[in-house]
Amino acid sequence: MSERKPEILQTALEIIADEGYGRLSMRALARASGMKLGALQYHFRTWEDMLRALVQFIADEVSGRLETRQRDSDDLTVYEIAEFMLSDTTDEILFPDKLWPQLWAMQQVEPLVSDLLEDVYAGYLQLLEQAMETAGRSSARAEALCLMSLLEAESLFVGSGRRWESDRANVRDTILKFIDEQYGEIA
């Protein structure tokens, strides 16, 4: 990836997070990146190329952070995964409170984004399912899907700017307490 591509993709994330996915276009991205459309198309020939690179950029960022966390232990526990997913609220790269709800909405109108994000979620599900199996759960996949749904929905209801944002700390504590009771903090 050229040196300029990550900067452009970061600008695309900022547009989505700050203005909504409906404002992201090749022209808007070129303008926000301080370049002409033709220069942007040198890096991303088509809208689809840019979307693929954008979702891969997100996936690589999340995977890198998980790998960094995983270096501290052989396998991440259910609790550690949940704690990780609930911890990135002030992130200046991924803007989780703003970005993920926009990406979920974008999936509904952009089939390519839907397909690409499903691959990201499949990796996330596999990690959770593996942790569930390690914790000795017989219905690991179903429990992993339930937990993934809970963790992902947290930002929709108590994320920045949401109606119940003031309850966020209590909601996070409650989710982690539930996970600790079900799976153990270390198991």
Image: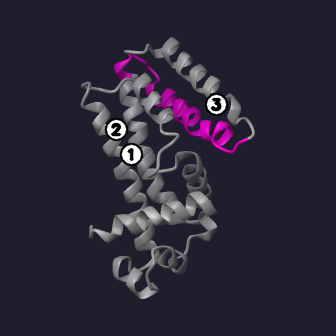
The percent coordinates of residue 62 (x first, y second) are 38, 45
**In front: mark 2 or mark 3?**
3
Up-down: is 75 above or below 184?
Answer: below
Whether residue 60 appears in magenta in the rendering, the answer is no
Up-down: is 28 above or below 95?
Answer: below
* Residue occupying image coordinates x 46% and y 50%: 92
Name the kind of residue labelled 3 in the image: Arg
The percent coordinates of residue 104 (x first, y second) are 58, 53
Q: Nearer the viewer, residue 140 or 99?
A: 99
Magenta stretch, main secondary structure class: helix
Quote the CA–CA distance across marks 2 and 1: 6 Å
Pointers 2 and 3 in contact (CB under 8 A)?
no
Q: Secondary structure at mark 3?
A: helix
* Residue occupying image coordinates x 43% and y 19%: 138
Q: Secondary structure at mark 1?
A: helix
Return the mark for residue 66. 2
Report the span colored magenta.
Answer: 133-162
Residue 40: image quadrant is: bottom left
Residue underneath mark 3: 168
Q: Earlier in the sequence, mark 3 or mark 1?
A: 1
Q: Residues within 10 Å of mark 2 (few under 14, many from 20)?
A: some
Of the 4 image quadrants, the one containing the C terminus is top left
Of the 4 image quadrants, the one containing the N terminus is bottom left
Pointers 2 and 1 in contact (CB under 8 A)?
yes
* Residue occupying image coordinates x 38% and y 81%: 45
Quote the CA–CA distance across marks 2 and 3: 23 Å
Return the mark for residue 62. 1
Q: Nearer the viewer, residue 121 or 66?
A: 66
